[in-house]
Structure formats: C-alpha cells, structure tokens
Amino acid sequence: MAALLLAASLAALPPAARAAGAEPAQSTPQAIVPQAIVEALYRPYLADPHAEKDTNIDSVAQVRRHATPALTRLLDADRACEKRTQGICALDFDIIIDGQDWDLSGFGLQAETSGDTATVTARFSNLGPRVLAYHFVRTGGRWLIDDLVILKDDAGAADHPWSLKDTLAAEYGPTARKKHR
C-alpha cells in the first residue's frame, strides 16, 4: 500500500519534474504525506524549470497553506510588514528555491519520520547546489510545516544554515526588538 501511495504521489508530478530527476524517496508510509506536500510546493517550479514563462510564484503563500499556527503567525507578520512599509521586510528571496530566479535541475527528495515529526530534504541545483530541509510536525492528525531550513551545501555560504522560523521570530517574535515588528 505504501508503494502504491508513493507511486501515486509521484505520478502527480508533471512530466518536466520526472524528467528533471525527481526520484521516489525511500520513505515510510508516515513520510508519504509530508513528501507529497513538499512535492506540491516544487511542482510549479518543476513545470517551468528554467523560469521561461512569466510565472509569479508566491512561495510564502504556498508554505503558509501547510504551516503550523506558530509559523503561520510569523509569516503573516512579515506580510503585514510588507503591506505597512510597501516594501521588503524579513524575506527578500523565494524561500522554496533559495534564490530570486531559478534554473532547476537534479531535483530529488528524501523523507524521514520519527513519531509525530518528519523531515523532507529537497536537493537540487539552482545556479548551484541547494539543500533545504522541511521540518514537519503532526498536529491534530495533520502534517504541518514547522520550519524550513536551508542547509550548508557545496557552496558553503557563510549565512547557512538558515532557519525560516528563527529568522521570522527574530523579527516578529515576542522578544524581537527589530524595526519591522
């Protein structure tokens, strides 16, 4: 049954995603739902892997649809800041692809679960290697994204690893003393 569910989730990927190297992760049945959520987040990018179409993908809205209440509040605070200042606040890049533009290749996912937590790691090239870990918690029977962490990769950027939740909490959390609060 698990293999059938995994095959069904991969079959939902567009041909471009399968051609770009999206491979089934070796996962347990509990990881299939988080993996399917992450696959859905990347689907618009993989449908246009070289950003050739005039596509405006709202990565924050995509993640927000699957976020825990705590992460949702932080994402909403950043959106409110953008509206209030009519500019960019804490998030100045596309959080799903770790960049502004994209030219994706070599996409693959790996999922791991442990009780009511799961991590789905996305690996791909976007003008260089990228490794992003989506941390999930199961709440009320639903898998929800609690954090997105951009991990160190071959590029070894000094500001990695980067946590979405920590970045937003520093700006908008209860102890934040930043200008965007």
Image: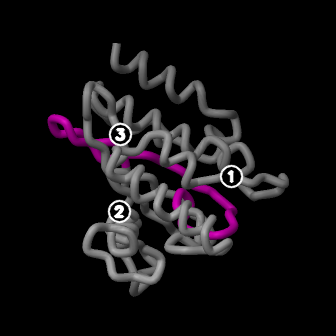
Q: Which residue lies at the image location 69% right of the left edge and 67% below the top edge?
A: 101
Q: Is disc 2 in contact with disc 1, using a CB cutoff of under 8 Å? A: no
The image quarter in which residue 165 lies? bottom left
> Residue 27, position in %: x, y?
31, 34
Q: Earlier in the sequence, mark 3 or mark 1?
A: 1
**Can you say which quadrant of the picture contains the N terminus?**
top left
Image: magenta residue range: 95-120
Furthest toward the front, the residue is 84
Q: Is residue 173 left or right of residue 96?
A: left
Residue farthest along the left direction in this orientation? 115
Q: Residues within 10 Å of mark 1 (few under 14, many from 20)?
A: few
Q: Quickly name the residue at label 3.
A: 144
Amino acid at pointer 1? Ile
Residue 110 magenta-drawn? yes
Task: Verify whether residue 130 appears in magenta.
Answer: no
Picture coordinates of residue 133 (x, y %)? 37, 56
Q: Secondary structure at mark 1?
A: loop
* Residue at the image position 70 percent from the left and 41 percent from the top: 16
